[in-house]
Image (tube, rainbow, N blue to C red):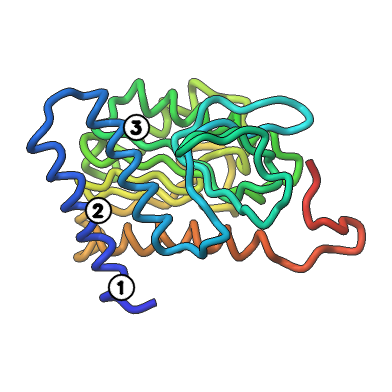
């Protein structure tokens, strides 16, 4: 994809999030609409066989916390346990990305969202298969050091989490901060590579590229060739 393509998505996120915030002051309504904006924008660039909804992920070992953002592959004939409008309960094998979406995230909300990603990822026995993220439009840390502090607080709250269970990407969009999980490191704050405006001139464009690419990449991995020992390519 070209830089102009990602810039158009970046501009759309900014414009739609800012427009509703200027008109409406009721925080719960703004939060729900912002979740819907992000689902709509991502859905518009995915094939018609893939949908984006909110709801729960179900496996043979349990059910996830309610999740703001689910990328669902509808080619699976048993994808849905239940669906109505944007809400769904979905079998884990049909999901390639989960995410938490916030308007103005606090540190406490960040730690809670971090934990929800871990709990959902724990349901998957195929380590590293599902993509997960936290996306906050406003608020949050503004520097690498600030992001490190928030991450350390989340690690302290969830000390037993394995690396593959952690969110893959954490975005503080308006502040221009992104944390990307480095799969080669251990379970501490160095697990994440962090960028801020000080590290990248066109930080919001960079954030949009990495965020969208992670979702598209997870969709591609969903269709990887099955292995001989795992005919379905998955194990739930």
> Where is residue 3 drawn, in percent x and y?
29, 75
Nearer the camera: disc 1 or disc 3? 1
* Mark 3 to mark 2 CA distance (whole Å): 27 Å
Tag shown at residue 13:
2
Vertical order, 71 against 2 (above or below):
above
* Mark 2 to mark 1 CA distance (whole Å): 13 Å
**Which residue shows up at 36% across the image and 38% down it?**
148
Q: What element carries label 3?
A: helix
> Where is residue 54 drawn, in percent x and y?
48, 36
Which one is nearer the viewer's eye here, 181 or 82? 82
For the residues bearing labels 3 and 2, Cβ distance under 8 angstroms: no
Give the residue at mark 3.
Answer: 149
Give the residue at mark 1.
Answer: 5
**Which residue shows up at 91% across the image and 63% down it?**
228
Mark nearer the N terminus (2 vs 1): 1
Which one is nearer the viewer's eye here, 102 or 58? 58
Q: Quadrant of residue 61?
A: top right
Q: Quadrant of residue 142?
A: top left
């Amino acid at each position: 994809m070209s830089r102009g393509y990602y810039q158009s998505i970046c501009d759309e996120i900014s414009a739609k999030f800012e427009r509703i915030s200027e008109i409406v002051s009721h925080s719960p309504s703004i939060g729900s609409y912002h979740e819907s904006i992000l689902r709509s924008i991502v859905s518009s660039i995915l094939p018609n066989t893939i949908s984006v909804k909110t709801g729960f992920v179900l496996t043979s070992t349990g059910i996830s916390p309610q999740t703001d953002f689910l990328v669902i592959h509808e080619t699976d004939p048993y994808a849905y346990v239940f669906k109505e409008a944007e809400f769904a309960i979905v079998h884990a094998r049909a999901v390639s990305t989960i995410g938490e979406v916030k308007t103005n995230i606090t540190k406490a909300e960040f730690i809670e969202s971090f934990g929800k990603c871990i709990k959902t990822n724990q349901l998957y026995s195929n380590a590293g298969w599902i993509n997960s993220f936290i996306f906050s439009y406003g608020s949050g840390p503004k520097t690498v050091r600030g992001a490190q502090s928030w991450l350390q607080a989340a690690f302290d709250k969830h000390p037993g989490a394995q690396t593959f269970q952690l969110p893959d990407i954490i975005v503080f969009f308006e502040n221009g901060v992104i944390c990307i999980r480095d799969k080669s490191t251990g379970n501490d704050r160095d697990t994440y590579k962090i960028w801020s405006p000080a590290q990248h001139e066109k930080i919001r464009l960079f954030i949009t590229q990495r965020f969208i690419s992670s979702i598209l990449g997870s969709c591609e991995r969903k269709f990887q060739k099955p292995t001989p020992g795992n005919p379905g390519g998955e194990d739930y």
